[in-house]
Image (spheres, helix red, strand yellow):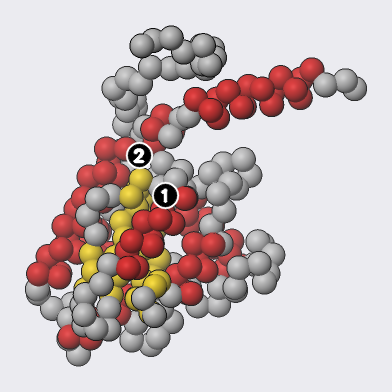
Amino acid sequence: MTDTPQLDDAYFAQPTLLQATPSSTHRPRIAMLYGSLRDRSFSRLMTEEAARVLTRMGAEVRIFDPRDLPLPDSEDADHPKVAELRELVTWSEGMVWCSPERHGAMTGIMKSQVDWIPLSLGGVRPTQGKTLAVMQVNGGSQSFNTVNQLRILGRWMRLLTIPNQSSVAKAFLEFDDNDRMLPSPYYNRMVDVMEELMRFTLLTRDVKDDLVDRYSERKESAEELSKRVNQKA
């Protein structure tokens, strides 16, 4: 069962236990996106509560404000808000995406932010191998449509989406008059998700390039390099 004539042995590698050497010592860098522009946005409030928890856990957290972000492809990539978003994603080692559920799906505000994040930026994939946690808030009963969609997007962006997730039903009942989340099983689940995100980020951030290193891409890159070097002047 080891007869594999299709393989190019020059680019084949047997996976081994990855060791992070040297290990990063700075605080984990977490970028957070939310999907609503309302004055009292529960996805923003949920994101802010999660940011407080992450900060207590030792992370450096930055929250992106989606106001004034243009629709995808309506402006050039050098638009200030687009540049801000892309710089934030490049800076980060992990991400949190939190969206309301609207008409059974994530909001356009949330999708627009993800659509402005390129798969490749100057030859570098800004999301590949980084961790992702997904959350949603609901105006009514609990649903998982949005977190499931966010997982699909995370996979396409080659993010390492953690197993746990948070979905808050009737979010308007879960925050007090000071816009702080009340103690509840929903709050506890959010803490669980942030705890898991931190662990996965610490575990993978120094080996993320190895985690997403692919035989097909190693082979393709070598073939493209050969064509470029051997082409006629």
Side of 233 where 78 appears, left or right: left
> Which residue is drawn at the image coordinates 29% and 22% (left, top)?
17
Where 230 falls versus 72 (above or below)?
Answer: above
Q: Real-space Cα distance between discs 2 and 1?
A: 17 Å
Picture quarter containing residue 62?
bottom left
x and y, in percent, of residue 40 in the image: 33, 86
Where 201 falls versus 135 (above or below)?
Answer: above
* Kind of element beneath mark 2: loop
Side of 225 where 31 appears, left or right: left
Q: Nearer the viewer, residue 21 or 147?
A: 147
x and y, in percent, of residue 195 in the image: 19, 53
> Which residue is drawn at the image coordinates 31% and 31% (left, top)?
23
Picture quarter containing residue 144?
bottom left
Q: Nearer the viewer, residue 78 or 224?
A: 224
Which corner quadrant holds the N terminus?
top left
Amino acid type of the residue tagged 2 in the rendering: Arg
Q: Are marks 2 and 1 in contact (CB under 8 Å)?
A: no
User: So how many labels did they put on this image?
Assistant: 2
Toward the right, the furthest residue is 233
Amino acid type of the residue tagged 1 in the rendering: Arg
Camera-side mark, 2 or 1: 1
Where 157 falls versus 14 (above or below)?
Answer: below
> Which residue is drawn at the image coordinates 39% and 36% (left, top)?
208
Q: Disc number at residue 205?
A: 2
Which corner quadrant holds the C terminus?
top right
Determine which residue is flagged by label 1.
155
Q: Disc number at residue 207?
A: none
